[in-house]
Amino acid sequence: MTAASAPVDVLVVGAGLAGLCAARELQRAGRSVCVLDKGRGVGGRLASRRMGAAVLDHGAQYFTLRSAQARNLLAAWFEDGTLQEWARGFALAGGGKKLDEVPRYIAPQGMNVLAKLLATGLPVTTSVRVASVRIGAAGWEVQTESGAVYAARTLLLTAPVPQSLELLSAGDVQIDAVHAAALGGIEYKRCIALLACLYGPSAVPAPGAVWFDGEPVSWLADNAHKRSPKDVDGALTIHAGPQYSLENWDEPDEVVTRELFGAVHRYLGAAVRESQLQRWRYSQPINPLAESCVVSSAGGVPVVFAGDAFGGPRVEGAILSGLAAAEQIVALMPAA
Ligand SMILES: Cc1cc2nc3c(=O)[nH]c(=O)nc-3n(C[C@H](O)[C@H](O)[C@H](O)COP(=O)(O)OP(=O)(O)OC[C@H]3O[C@@H](n4cnc5c(N)ncnc54)[C@H](O)[C@@H]3O)c2cc1C
């Protein structure tokens, strides 16, 4: 174990949307921050993967915007074309289309671009897995898997809630009992995602996605339609439904891959060149809490929980939760 670094005002665990939005606002308000993420890059479940020349979104597929606050945060990136409207509905697997008035937005270069933009100018360190958090001399001591120790006056936990609670219990930290009970009850759906690049165009109809009944597949998108200009060869994201994902979680990749391709075969349109599976253990919260974040404490030292489990199990919910957490922390910690 190495000696703790000089304490920052706020240590943020997680460089997903909630963590990045919170860190930006905290930095803007003059608080020192440090963001740690176990992933190779930023974005968490706002995830895109390159396969050959194609970019495939394998977590969030699009986002909606209902609040002025989130809309204002992203306005400049809509103006310069980084973010664009994709569609107002998609094909149904049973036939026909379901259209409504709700614009679904994307980053045509890959959804993860939004996270990279939000992270610009922030002190984010990736490929660092936090192993435990405990109370230390300056407030919190955050220990990483490799033994490094970071000190902070306030802790903001934005990982899926069961993972955040594990960090506290690994450090033998007890938070307020009412908060512990509420947070301990949050559950998540699982999602197995199959990514596939094709030798030619897919048979997915414009605007590029199909809503399924839910099991075994809930969603199929051809990422080629999301790119600008449109890619020629199909690049599919297939999301298994929550029930199928739960029941087949430990099945071998080749079994799951065969079954999911079987469920969408009429949309393939061309032979599969390459495929990969991704298992999302915590894909979306089933029972998010109504509040935008939870401010708790352990022995009088503040710890804040944020993410899509607070306010809304989606991209916009995570953004709003991060902003709300920053506001609460600024109020808790008057500037020095
Ligand atoms: C398959 C799938 C499809 C989805 N589709 C949509 C959609 O179409 N539209 C929509 O709006 N939303 C969708 N969502 C939900 C959306 O992606 C999330 O609501 C949002 O991205 C959550 O952001 P977050 O910051 O709360 O959490 P996350 O993005 O999960 O960020 C948490 C971060 O914490 C990090 N972390 C965890 N533990 C540790 C640790 N010990 N040490 C360091 N770092 C750690 C993780 O690496 C991660 O980067 C989808 C999600 C999935 C998985």
Image: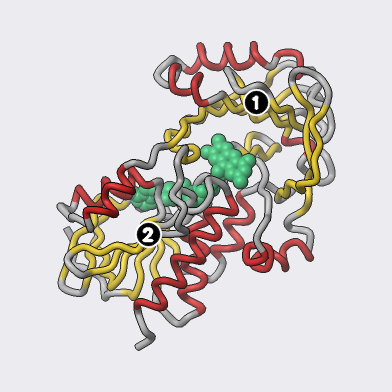
- Badge 2 marks a residue whose secondary structure is strand
Residue 195 sits in quarter:
top right
Picture coordinates of residue 200, whole percent (x, y): 80, 23
Q: Which quadrant holds residue 215?
A: top right
| Nearer-the-camera pick, 65 or 171 | 65
Task: Look at label 1 and name its amino acid.
Answer: Ala
Residue 126 vertical placement versus 69 (above, below):
above
Task: Using residue 41 as the reference point, say whether residue 157 is left or right of it.
Answer: left
Quadrant where the N terminus sits is bottom left
Q: In this view, does 11 lie to the left or right of 196?
A: left
Which residue: 65% across, 37% down?
56
> Which residue was labeled with disc 2?
294
Tell me which residue sits at (44%, 65%) in the image. 325
Instruction: Give the foreground label among 2 and 1.
Output: 2
Please report whichever mark, 2 or 1, sits nearer to the chain's N-terminal start. Answer: 1
Seen in the picture, residue 181 relative to 135 is either above or below; the reply is above
**Callout 2 crowding tier (Cα within 10 Å): few <14, some 14–19, many ≥20:** many
Query: Within 8 Å of ligand 1, the CB of disc 2?
Result: no
Q: Is residue 145 visible?
A: no
Q: Nearer the viewer, residue 77 or 48?
A: 77
In the displayed structure, 255 sits above or below 61; it is above
Residue 144 vertical position relative to residue 323 in the rendered view, above or below: above
Secondary structure beneath label 1: strand
Label number found at residue 196: 1
Percent position of residue 194, x then y = 58, 26
Q: Residue 280 carries which label?
A: none
Q: In which quarter of the image is the C terminus?
A: bottom left
